[in-house]
Image (cartoon, rainbow, N blue to C red):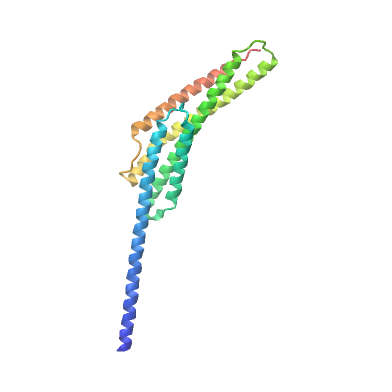
C-alpha cells in the first residue's frame, strides 16, 4: 500500500510538472507572438511617418540629405529589431512587415540618391554655363576644359535622370507592398494613396525635365 501511494505521488508530481511546463510554454509562446505583433505594428507605423515626412521634403531644403539619410538609417534599425523577433509566431505578418520596411528603406535610399544627384547635376551645369560665358581669349586650354565640363555635366545629369527613374519605379511598386501589409494587418497605418500618387507624379515630371536637360547638353556644340 505504501509503495502504491508513493507511485501515485510520483505520477501526480510528474503530471503537475508537465502541466506547468505546458502552461509556461503557452505563456512564453503568447508573449513571443505579442512581441512580434507589437514590433511589426510599431515599425510599420513609424516607417510610414518617416516616409510621409521624406516625401514632403523639398530637394532644395538645406537639410534634405541629412534628414533622408537619418530616416533610412532609422528604418534599418526597425528592420534589425523586427528580424530578431520569432517570425514563426505569425509568418504572414512577419514577412509582410519585413517587405514593407525593406521597400520603404529602398524608397528612402533612392530619394537620397536622387537628391544628391540633383545637386551634382545642377552644379556641373552651372560650371559649364559659366565657362561658356567667359570665352575671351579662347584657346586650346579653354576648349579642353569646356569638353571636360560638358562630359561631366552629361554624366551627372544622366545619373540624376536614372536615379529619378528608379525612385519613381519604387513608388509605383509600393502599392503592391501596401496591399500585402493590409492583408496581414488590416489596421496598419500606411501612406494614403494620394500621397504616393503625388510623389510618383513629381518624380516622373522631374525625370522628364532631367531627360530634356541631358538632351540639351548632348546637343551643345563646343566652339573650336
Residue 209 coordinates in the image, percent (x, y): 47, 22
Q: Is residue 4 left or right of residue 63?
A: left
Up-down: is 38 above or below 203?
below
**Residue drawn at 45 percent across, 38 percent down:** 71
Locate the N terminus and report the quarter of the image it occupies: bottom left
Q: Quadrant of residue 34?
A: bottom left
**Outermost residue to the right:** 140
**Residue drawn at 65 percent across, 19 percent down:** 145
Q: Is residue 183 left or right of residue 157?
A: left
Up-down: is 149 above or below 2?
above
Residue 74 coordinates in the image, percent (x, y): 45, 42
Residue 176 coordinates in the image, percent (x, y): 38, 39
Up-down: is 136 above or below 39?
above
Residue 174 coordinates in the image, percent (x, y): 40, 37
Q: Is residue 58 visible?
A: yes
**Residue drawn at 66 percent across, 16 percent down:** 143
Amino acid at each position: 500500500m505504501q509503495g502504491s501511494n508513493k507511485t501515485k505521488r510520483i505520477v501526480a508530481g510528474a503530471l503537475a510538472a508537465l502541466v506547468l511546463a505546458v502552461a509556461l510554454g503557452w505563456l512564453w509562446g503568447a508573449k513571443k507572438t505579442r512581441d512580434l505583433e507589437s514590433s511589426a505594428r510599431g515599425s510599420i507605423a513609424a516607417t510610414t511617418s518617416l516616409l510621409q515626412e521624406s516625401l514632403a521634403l523639398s530637394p532644395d531644403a538645406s537639410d534634405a540629405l541629412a534628414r533622408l539619410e537619418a530616416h533610412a538609417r532609422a528604418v534599418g534599425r526597425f528592420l534589425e529589431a523586427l528580424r530578431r523577433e520569432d517570425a514563426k509566431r505569425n509568418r504572414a505578418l512577419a514577412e509582410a512587415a519585413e517587405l514593407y520596411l525593406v521597400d520603404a528603406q529602398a524608397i528612402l535610399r533612392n530619394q537620397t540618391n536622387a537628391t544628391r544627384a540633383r545637386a551634382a547635376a545642377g552644379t556641373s551645369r552651372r560650371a559649364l554655363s559659366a565657362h561658356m560665358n567667359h570665352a575671351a581669349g579662347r584657346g586650346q586650354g579653354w576648349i579642353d576644359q569646356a569638353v571636360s565640363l560638358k562630359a561631366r555635366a552629361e554624366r551627372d545629369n544622366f545619373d540624376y535622370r536614372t536615379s529619378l527613374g528608379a525612385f519613381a519605379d519604387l513608388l509605383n511598386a509600393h502599392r503592391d507592398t501596401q496591399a500585402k501589409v493590409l492583408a496581414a494587418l488590416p489596421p496598419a497605418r500606411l501612406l494614403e494613396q494620394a500621397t504616393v500618387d503625388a510623389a510618383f507624379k513629381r518624380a516622373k515630371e522631374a525625370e522628364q525635365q532631367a531627360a530634356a536637360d541631358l538632351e540639351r547638353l548632348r546637343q551643345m556644340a563646343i566652339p573650336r
